[in-house]
Image (tube, grey):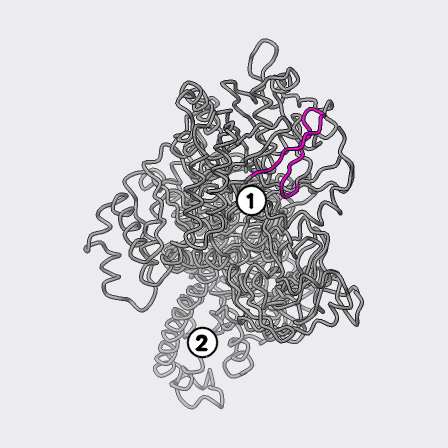
Amino acid sequence: MEEDNTIKTSKYNALNFLPMNLFEQFRRLANAYFLSLVFLQLIPQISPLASYTTLIPLTVVLAITAVKDAIDDMKRHQNDNQVNNRPVLLLVNGRMEEDKWMNVQVGDIIKLKNNQPVTADILLLSSSEPYGLTYIETAELDGETNLKVKQAISVTSELEDNLELLSAFDGEVKCDLPNNKLDKFTGTLTYKGKKYSLGHDKLLLRGCIIRNTDWCYGLVIYTGPDTKLMQNSGKSSFKRTQMDRFMNVLVLWIFLLLIIMCFIMAIGHGIWQSKIGYYFQAFMPWDNYVSSSVASAALIYWSYFIILNTMVPISLYISVEIIRLGNSFYINWDQKMFYAPRNTQAQAHTTTLNEELGQVKYVFSDKTGTLTQNIMIFNKCSIYRKLYGNSSDKVGSKVTDCKKEKVDFSYNKLASPNFAFYDNTLVEAVKNGDKWVHLFFLALSLCHTVMSEEKVEGELVYQAQSPDEGALVTAARNFGFVFRSRTSDTITVVEMGVTRVYQLLAILDFSNVRKRMSVIVRTPEDRLMLFCKGADTIICELLQSSCTDLIDVTMEHLDDFATEGLRTLMVAYRELDAAFFQTWSHKHSAAYLSLEDREYKLSVVYKEIEKDLMLLGATAIEDKLQDAVPETIITLNKAQIKIWVLTGDKQETAVNIAYACSIFEDEMDEVFMVQGKNYETVFQELRAARAKMKPETSLESNPTNVRLSSKPKMPFIVPDEVPNGNYGLVISGYSLACALEENLELELLQTACMCKGVICCRMTPLQKAQVVELVKKYKKAVTLAIGDGANDVSMIKAAHIGVGIRGLEGMQAMLNSDFSFSQFHYLQRLLLVHGRWSYNRICKFLNYFFYKNFTFTLVHFWYAFYNGFSAQTVYDSWFMTCFNLIYTSLPVLGLSLFDQDMNDTWSLSFPELYEAGQQNLFFNKKKFVNCLIYGIYSSFVLFFVSMGTIHNSERDDGKDISDFQTFSLIVQTSLMCVVTMQIALKTTYWTLMSHLFIWGSLGFYFCMLFFLYSDGLCVMFPSIFHFLGVARTSLNQTQLWLSIILSTVLCIIPAIGYKFLKRLVYPVFVDKVLDLSWHYRKYPLPPPIHVRLKHSNLRRSAYAFSHQNGFGALITSGKTMSRRQKKKNSFPLKK
């Protein structure tokens, strides 16, 4: 176990940076290849080139990459230090001392205050609340924002805040080894000779926030990496793109081709030496170390190995790093991804994954804080046949959102300043004393388990078990029915300025089965009233028959609420007879005290009184989505990106959000619910769903089933299957635990991948990562995970690309992400604009770069047949040095940094264009082979057209021009013109910089030509500059220019023909979309007509109480009240 509380998200430290970084870089086969070349060039007998020609570029590449990695990791170190250096109060020698989080050790006693994050996993010892209760929020752990309660064991709660007693505490804790189970903890405390059982309800986990509790003390159990939060965070791994892995494969292919070519050259040299060279030793003597033609051939093999190394030039990797870095800056600089309210911009934390942003197929998203704002808003309500919440003007016309005016609550001094409502008719009804409106809001102010804090008179702070309850009580507060305080048997409400105290007789608490809660109170007028709220499907069954007409009207209103994706519940009441209640109360007490079947007996008793209710109305709460979330998901779906929501929230809430976000639609053929609790049930549910979506997938002849029957040892790619309709899938964490077993995981994957949207709820952080790993394992697709809390870190690390939302749930997700921003809707811009551009650019770059270097290098192959395979180079050594480094570097970087086939607006308007990246159409094995064939053809043209030009030819003045230097000049000038025209053909977005880079580089080549071949340099440095006056004397000959033009035309004709004929004869889907986009640029479509669709009432109710049973029993027991009344509600009540 870890002794201190230090966390580490960084990859390196000062000692291991160099070896680890070099190891990671040499995992690129190209880097290992160039290192081997350096060693070969150290052998003078075989090296026609100096070793520094490879060593220096390799060192530069390694250094640039290392510096970039070091900067990225230093940022992680800074973020780690920020967390590790947070202050904490530590009990040392009988007094509290402030220390740093990282210095906390197992066995320390620490003090936490209200609204502070929990430092480590600690055993709760005592708190400011009665009976050692402590209230916490666990949003960063499981995404749930509802209030949870922990309780210290009685023997330690008596320690309270007595530092002397706490210092003397000498208990011994034995517990589980560190594990990732958030809801499991087993241990024993031995204290004063007695043993006490410890459970999960005694443990405060790192990542929780203390709420509604002044202070608490805890004993540190797990620290740092051993905490359950960090155990669920997953391990940091080096992420490499598919393009990186593919380039490694290409290096192997090229290496194999290089070996074959060198072998051919060596054989050719051996034959030439034995038949010709041997007899001409008087004119061309052999070196001393060459004993035979075989030995000479062996040496020539390695010489050509060095000369032809430019087939994979090291400048390729420098260029790739620069391109990725430049495209990362575009993300950082994008003002359309800047979020002004928080003054935050998008950031690319990892600069090596840009092109993979253009290939994403699966997006795994958290819900709370990612799709939603984690804010509940009381939006509308229906009260006794009247609908409130639709803003309208004096004429009665509906008012648009931008023209809405907030209701003035200044008449209510206790109103919350953060509450907003836009329908004045409801306020008027309240002021006019409407009986039903008053009763409706009274029900909301009484029927709940919310706790109130009032540290400053008049400033109420509500702590609710679920955010819905908080929103409802806040709404009642603003409309004049202010829940002010409670004790174990009273609720104090300020009604329209008048304080009234209601006697609390019973709380019929919420459960996931009941889906409702009720309170029974005695009013100041001595009336017995039952108020109930819950899901409409449940409440409707409990209403009086006289409410039929009212139910019909309210149902219509609920349909309207559901259309807007609002969370709904019904509110009802009943006035009780005193004698009936007295009888029922005895039954309730007996059921409550029962030792057997208590839950069942209570439910029976609850049903006896929760009947014959009168309907008051219904509420509609907006689980406020982040801006433009539905539009973003619709756009991503058009791009064939599948959205899976992985959340710790409950099923009903998650499904409601899925509909609100357009992940699910009412037009779907079916949404499958997988809720089995064992292997067999889950298997049957998944198989039934798959059989309905595509029956043939269940047949034994199905390719996947055939492959499975052979029990392959290695993972294989599961092909995509198209269902016969539009489906969705919902699966809970319990069912998922079964489905992720080895024998069932493929059944889950096949079923889920056929669905348009997938919702996985009640998940642990580890399960989120397991789902991502499952898709990565069996699908040839790029995955992206996006979340905002620490519970999302594991899936962010597991996915190919991790995106962190800078939200309200801490910084862990952002710190562990590859990219981060503040709003979910920026994702479509990250993928469809920056991702697609990056993918297109890197593909254009690689296609052009490989073609350029094949053409450049393979000229040596043809030349070998004319120079006795002697490893003589075609080009001037200075041209070989400058070709990739200077002459052609700027044009290709300009293409890779500035080119756009379509601007950002049109890229977002036509998300279908994104499919090209998902299918990897622009650079693959076929494209690479095309580059190789085209390079062979171009090198053949360049060599033989140039050779034919100078063969037995003469200058204008009659002198012979059949010399090597003139031939070399023609070949290299033709090559420069060809590659310049090729990049001009590939450029689709011409700017001033494009013209400058492309034509400027060609012009610069000619300037350098005359400079390097000038008389002055050749005279001053004859051993370095050999081509004396060649440019001046050769480029004034007409036949040379005609040769250059002919070579250029012959080389670019195939490219032009392919570019234009392909779209006409073999257009792919992307070509059709591009043609369509160009058409719509000229003839824009009219704006779409938005049709509002009615949502099915089958999923209308999504009332989200807490996942656990409520605080009802806790409140009525009085445990929460005795000290709270003294400390927090000490203000006199105004009557």
Q: In this view, does 671 lie to the left or right of 45?
A: left
Which residue is drawn at the image coordinates 35% and 48% (left, top)?
674
Which residue carries the number 2 mark? Answer: 870
Report the disc number at residue 1112.
1
Q: Where is residue 683 in the image (x, y as percent from the top left)?
A: 29, 54
Secondary-structure class at tag 1: helix
Inspect the image, locate mark 1, and give the three-letter code of the amino acid beneath it: Gly
* Residue 1129 image point, x, y percent: 74, 42
Q: Quadrant of residue 940?
A: bottom left
What is the quadrant of the N terminus in the image?
bottom right
State the extent of the magenta-drawn residues as a range. Answer: 487-505
* Relative vertical location of residue 583 with respect to residue 798 in this rendering, above or below: above
Q: Does the magenta stretch include residue 503?
A: yes
Confirm whether the magenta stretch covers residue 808.
Answer: no
Q: Distance between the residues labelled 2 and 1?
A: 93 Å
Furthest residue toward top: 395
Instruction: Give me the residue at 68% from left, 73% from top.
Output: 14
